[in-house]
Image (tube, rainbow, N blue to C red):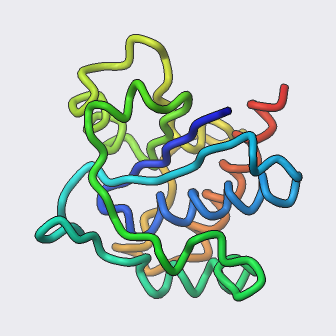
Amino acid sequence: MIRILFVCHGNICRSTMAEFVMKDIVNKAGEADEFHIESAATHTDEIWNGMGSPVYPPARAKLREHGIGTDDNELGVSAKRARLSVKGDYDKYDYIIGMDSANIRDMNRIYGGDPDGKIYKMLDFTDRDGDVADPWYTGNFDATWRDVSEGCRGLFSHIKE
């Protein structure tokens, strides 16, 4: 089984979009049983008293616009709650994908480094460099969708090679 963890600051926009885009890709490829896919946060901004916030409504709407999170393709979107990434995640996952450079720094702090080379930036799996657009600040969920969907397709291709 291939285990993938997507990580961003709060785990309500970018990493959750990546989680469900990747679940959709492996589901449509008939390989859902071969993957375990989750997402997590580097900070507790969206976690209070042990309860995480749900997927941010505009992120959920963008997923739904692309057929993810609908009644016939739910994939767990309605149940998803933000969670904090912890040191033990490093040993649990094969690929740990951060959305931006700040996430990568935070992940290295949380995990105590990357001795096994498991940490990547999402756009490492595209032919573009940089960070996944953060819609929390820009409100541009189209750009985030483009970055996340290209990154997930690239990651899936990388894994299948």
Q: Quadrant of the C terminus?
A: top right
Query: In the image, residue 4 lies at what x, y percent?
Result: 56, 40
Residue 52, relative to residue 61: is it above or below?
Answer: above
Task: Determine the residue positioned at 55% across, 75% down.
Answer: 77
Residue 109, relative to residue 60: is it above or below?
Answer: above
Q: Quadrant of the N terminus?
A: top right
Query: In the image, residue 10 lies at what x, y percent?
Result: 30, 62
Residue 161 relative to residue 62: left or right: right
Residue 56 relative to residue 142: left or right: left
Looking at this view, is 49 or 127 the one in front? 49
Query: In the image, residue 81 lies at what x, y percent?
Result: 37, 70
Residue 39 relative to residue 61: left or right: left
Task: Determine the residue positioned at 49% across, 48% down.
Answer: 6
Task: Determine the residue positioned at 46% across, 29% down.
Answer: 119
Residue 68, relative to residue 58: is it above or below?
Answer: above
Query: In the image, residue 36 lies at what x, y percent?
Result: 60, 45
Residue 69 relative to residue 67: left or right: left
Q: Quadrant of residue 3?
A: top right
